[in-house]
Image (tube, rainbow, N blue to C red):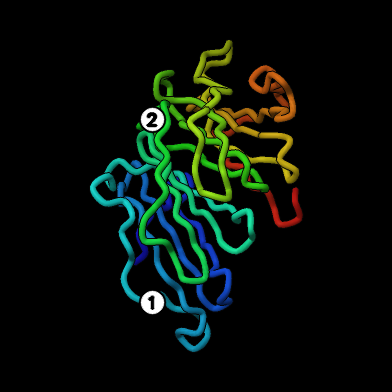
């Protein structure tokens, strides 16, 4: 059985080998319910009579921090289009693995940031051009929760320690409002975030990333009765 967990915010992501169309890498992260850590599998689409098969054992990327690993994982193409960056987060460190024609790098690029969060739930996304990362830490404690925006270098895989708090958990007349899902627009000029009151309703906000004051550009564009929801840019860019 594959590791990861169905309850995880971003339980798995598949990244192709950029030079071999039959080889893929499946990265998994556990959950608060089942903290299985961070792993990847190699998949050969020539296996099992062309149906694809896992090759070898899972590779443990979490190590001693597996029990603390977040439910967040994303990937973005490198600037030279010759590799991919697979990005995850634990405590106050971004772990970035390069995937190129030789496979998954043995060692990650580590970027420590000032904001430490043990809030496992919530999404992590990269802008389509790889210039920014948005990360949502779902929780009610302001010191460890919120939506932050970072600068990402898609040439080196480094995350700049310049996190801007765009949205912290707070109370409204209707109750709590805490961030969960995030996504960038196709051109990377807008950022969208879904929030939850942890009970029965969620909201969708938009940020203008070209504004001189991104945090105050927040606009409520939708709300409905539902516990919480994720966001995903489609292949049609919608």
Q: Which residue: 55% across, 67% down?
A: 16
224 displayed left or right of 195: right
> Relative to 84, does residue 187 appear above or below in the rendering?
above
Above/below status of 109 relative to 56: above
Q: Residue at x 69, y 28 (%)?
A: 207
Label 2: which secondary element:
loop
Q: What element carries label 1?
A: strand
Q: In the image shown, does 122 or 91 lie closer to the viewer?
A: 91
- Label 1: which residue? 55
Whether residue 198 can be seen here:
yes
Q: Which of 91 and 154 is in front in this view?
A: 154
- Horizontal and vertical percent for residue 210? 74, 29
Give left or right: position of 70 versus 238: left
Image coordinates of residue 227 in percent, x first then y, are 53, 33
Give left or right: position of 237 versus 215.
right
Numbered badge on residue 117 = 2
Q: Earlier in the sequence, mark 2 or mark 1?
A: 1
> Mark 2 Cα within 10 Å, few/some/many (few <14, many 20+)?
many
Task: Give the class, few, some or many, for how many residues have Cα within 10 Å of label 1's Cα (few <14, many ≥20).
Answer: few
Residue 84 or 226: which is nearer the viewer? Answer: 84
Which quadrant, please, contains the N terminus?
bottom left
Q: Where is residue 132 shown, x and y percent of the image?
A: 60, 39
Foreground residue among 161 and 86: 161
Residue at image point 43% right, 18% down: 142
Spatial CA distance of label 2 from label 1 is 34 Å
In the orientation shown, which residue stands out farthest toward the left? 64
Q: Position of residue 64 (x, y in %)?
A: 23, 47
Whether the residues at callouts 2 and 1 have beta carbons within 8 Å, the answer is no
């Amino acid at each position: 059985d594959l590791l990861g967990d169905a309850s995880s915010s971003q339980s798995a992501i598949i990244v192709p080998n950029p030079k071999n169309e039959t080889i893929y890498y499946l990265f998994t992260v556990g959950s608060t319910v089942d903290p299985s850590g961070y792993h990847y599998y190699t998949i050969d689409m020539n296996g099992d009579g062309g149906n694809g098969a896992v090759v070898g054992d899972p590779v443990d990327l979490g190590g001693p921090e597996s029990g603390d690993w977040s439910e967040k994982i994303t990937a973005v193409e490198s600037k030279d289009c010759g590799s991919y960056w697979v990005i995850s987060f634990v405590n106050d460190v971004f772990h970035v693995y390069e995937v190129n024609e030789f496979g998954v790098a043995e060692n990650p690029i580590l970027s420590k940031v000032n904001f430490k969060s043990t809030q496992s739930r919530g999404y992590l996304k990269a802008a389509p051009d790889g210039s920014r990362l948005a990360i949502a830490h779902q929780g009610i404690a302001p010191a460890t929760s919120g939506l932050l925006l970072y600068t990402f270098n898609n040439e080196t895989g480094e995350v700049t320690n310049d996190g801007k708090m765009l949205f912290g958990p707070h109370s409204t007349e209707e109750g709590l409002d805490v961030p969960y899902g995030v996504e960038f627009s196709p051109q990377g000029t807008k950022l969208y975030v879904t929030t939850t009151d942890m009970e029965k309703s969620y909201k969708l906000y938009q940020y203008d990333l070209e504004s001189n004051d991104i945090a105050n550009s927040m606009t409520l564009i939708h709300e409905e009765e539902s516990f919480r929801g994720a966001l995903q840019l489609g292949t049609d860019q919608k």
